[in-house]
Image (tube, helix red, strand yellow):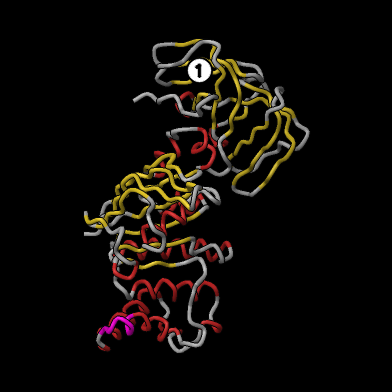
Amino acid sequence: MATLSLKAVTKAFGPTKVIHGIDLDIAHGEFIVFVGPSGCGKSTLLRMIAGLEDVSTGDVEIDGAVVNAIPAAERGLAMVFQSYALYPHMSVKQNLSFGLENLGTPKAEIARRVDEAARMLRIEPLLARKPGQLSGGQRQRVAIGRAVVREPKIFLFDEPLSNLDAELRVQMRIEIGNLHQRLGNTMIYVTHDQVEAMTMADRIAVLRDGRLEQFGKPLDLYNRPANLFVAGFIGSPRMNFLSGKIAGVGANSVDVALDGGGTVSIPCAPEGAQPGEAVKFGIRPEHIGLTVNGAGDAALAVTLTEQLGGESYLHGALPSGETLSMRLAGQTRVARGDSIGLTLGEPGFRHLFHTDSGLAFAPLA
């Protein structure tokens, strides 16, 4: 078993507090992703788990035991960094075995672990090479292999794919996912890329300014974001937000008069809804449709069309001046300068947020 719990964890550098009371419980074998914009505290939180940063207050628990005072080398964790941090004068095989040699691991055991990691990561032909003779993807495999040979309780990844090109990132994403399936270890992965988070995680922790905004399964965050920040951060292109005022409150819905014209009904728990309250209506680009006759929930003046072959993106402005993006399957004849009518999604795809707090109205159960 390798469980991890954070109990009201904080971190301050002098008077500046950068982590604000994080509580998380991570089960054995989970793949957890910390995601958020630069400076949100995700790497600092990972380093606190690793023991590379002290905890100001609160507790880090591994398998139920508080490890705040235990040095990093004794926590049974292995970390893969954004920079590969390989020894340039050593061969791949020496890089893989060096840490185990320092721990006094028997030579036969070192050979077994190195051979097994090399097979798993498909770097057997590279064992005699030095890091300078490897591609970026190969060096990242070696860095991961160095963590694998330690047979840790928990793997920690700090933006390991940031230095790779787009194609290699996709390939390594798949390989890390496959590695998790084979090993079954608990893994915690830090990234600013929400696509990586959505495709790799069992659960995602969304961080902003050192605070946990939401923690849950990828599609739960996508379909039921807790607030405006999560709704805008998870999803590419981001969710559209349109300003409006509450026009009516029903038993299981709220009607919103949009500033750009038209009224939409959002199925949600109406508790706290006040007629006249300023709110934000949210709709994802893929849930917006074109109308046949040009009428609909809204009119869009198209300012940019992006044709990707299998799908198309339209960007434009509403009469209110607010911008909006939509995604269409396949190809489109709509061009820049056209005016089109839109349907703002089926009711089940609509979201509603309080403008002041940013919190979402609770969806219907």
| Residue 115 in view of the camera | no
Q: Foreground residue, 216 or 60?
A: 60
The amino acid type of the residue labelled 1 equals Ser
Pick the quarter of the image with the N terminus. bottom left
Task: Read off the magenta span.
Answer: 100-105
The residue that label 1 is drawn on is 265
Would residue 57 be counted in the magenta stretch? no
Q: Foreground residue, 128 or 23?
A: 23
Q: Residues within 10 Å of mark 1 (few under 14, many from 20)?
A: many
The residue located at (31%, 58%) in the rendering is 68
The residue located at (57%, 36%) in the rendering is 285
Q: Position of residue 227 (x, y in %)?
A: 47, 32
> In the figure, residue 325 lies in which quadrant?
top right
Is 130 positioned to the left or the right of 175 in the image? right
> In the figure, residue 142 lies in which quadrant?
bottom left
Callout 1 secondary element: strand
The residue located at (55%, 44%) in the rendering is 236
The relative height of residue 195 versus residue 228 in the rendered view (above or below) is below
Q: Foreground residue, 124 or 34?
A: 34
Q: Foreground residue, 97 or 320?
A: 97
Q: Position of residue 265 (x, y in %)?
A: 50, 17
Is 155 positioned to the left or the right of 40 in the image? left
| Residue 359 in view of the camera | yes
Pick the quarter of the image with the C terminus. top left
Q: Position of residue 64 (x, y in %)?
A: 21, 54
Is 131 positioned to the left or the right of 110 in the image? right
Q: Position of residue 275 (x, y in %)?
A: 52, 10
The residue located at (42%, 65%) in the rendering is 175
As drawn, the residue found furthest toward the front would be: 14
> In the figure, residue 261 lies in which quadrant?
top right
